Amino acid sequence: MRRYLPIAGLAVVTALAPATLPAQSPSEPLEIARTLAARYPTSTTLAYIPALSWGMSLRLSLAVDDPAIGEKTVAELRPYLDGTVPVMAEPYRLTNIAGAAALFDASIFGIAEGQALAQEAADFLLPTEAGEVIRFATGWTDDMYMGASLLGRVAAATEDPRYRDAVGALLTTYAERLQRPDGLFVHAPDGPVAWGRGNGFAALGLLEALTYLPDEWEGYPRLLDIFQRHMDAMAGHQSASGAWRQVVDVPESYEELTVTAMMVTAMARGVRIGWLDADRFLPIIDRAWAAVVERVGEDGSVRDACTSTGAGTSLEYYLERPIVNGVDDRAGGLVMMAAMEMELFRNG
């Protein structure tokens, strides 16, 4: 059975002192999504970060029957859709190519050409050399989301096994390299730390695959097992406030927004579709969503979001990454994703 539902699921860098923001109401995920859609993305360069906000804005537009939200997004995507700006340009980076997932999502709003452009980008990621999992990979858990978000969509739309098999190889290979026996993921082979957002990338990559790939595929049970072990491990590291930490298993590290939003998305969809036990995860999700809401201001600003982070070789590297308190495209997009998932989780 396919779970490919196109409308499903729906910076200022400061010192480490947290900012104080006027909080939103935790009962209104669509209102939070509206606030964030009006503010993000601030950059319209095709890449995975703006694509987070674009994809969620298109879904939000339909969910609240407000065409203006979707029209704003389509206008921002138009230079790529009409070929004025190339979808793929040197230097080639997976983080940029992954942004083509938003072009695919434009089909939600009736823009058919976006799907063909997304397929071209997916073709560009397919391995061309022996031993290659996908092209332009870093080896970090980030790749799990970047690759699966694009390849999974194209796999579902085309039913071409090349894309499905590429997603499966990507996620299982990375799990073998990076998932610890306790279920958590380290960030990279040379970054052996359970970084918060790194675990979020692993979770969302697995989530995208489980959402878009057919569960009768022979590789599906393996991906589901990896996801369930990961969610079980993450559940055991939730803080008393409901958030997860910058380094998941280091209690002294600060509570961080993006990993918490990513866990809301993964766990809420996991329960909604039936991959995770509702009795166990319902209270975890509710606490996590409250922790997300607490970190979003009425003007769309955020707090406690880790800045851009490559792989580091020491625990101190991750503990000392600056916090973003203010405007942040990445955090804004990830919270939008969590808000849209919470709306489906609560109201169907």
Image: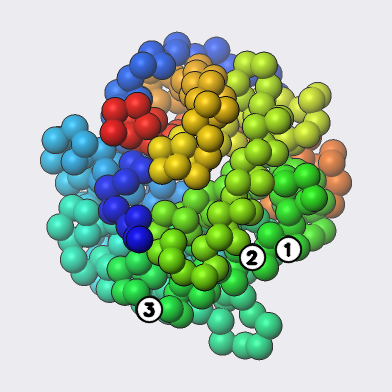
Residue type of the residue flagged with mark 1? Glu
> In the image, what residue occupies the spot 78% across and 45% down?
182
In this rendering, is residue 320 above or below 198?
above
Badge 1: residue crowd in 10 Å (few <14, some 14–19, many ≥20): few
Are circles 1 and 3 on residues that touch, CB within 8 Å? no
Residue type of the residue flagged with mark 3? Asp
Are circles 1 and 2 on residues that touch, CB within 8 Å? yes
User: Horizontal and vertical percent for residue 240?
Assistant: 67, 16
- Tell whether 316 sits left or right of 51: right
> Which residue lies under the disc numbered 1?
176
Judged from the image, the secondary structure of the residue bearing numbered disc 2 is: helix
> Which residue lies under the disc numbered 2?
172
Q: Earlier in the sequence, mark 3 or mark 2?
A: 3
> In the image, what residue occupies the spot 18% across and 61% down?
111
Q: How many discs appear?
A: 3
User: Horizontal and vertical percent for residue 119?
Assistant: 35, 74
Residue type of the residue flagged with mark 2? Thr
Judged from the image, the secondary structure of the residue bearing numbered disc 3 is: loop
User: Horizontal and vertical percent for residue 177?
Assistant: 75, 63
Q: Earlier in the sequence, mark 1 or mark 3?
A: 3
Name the image quarter holding residue 46: bottom left
> Which residue is more in the foreground, 43 or 4?
4
> Which residue is more in the foreground, 337 or 275?
275
In this rendering, is residue 306 above or below 153?
above
Judged from the image, the secondary structure of the residue bearing numbered disc 1 is: helix
> Which residue lies under the disc numbered 3?
160
Badge 2: residue crowd in 10 Å (few <14, some 14–19, many ≥20): some
Quadrant location of the N terminus in the rendered image: bottom left
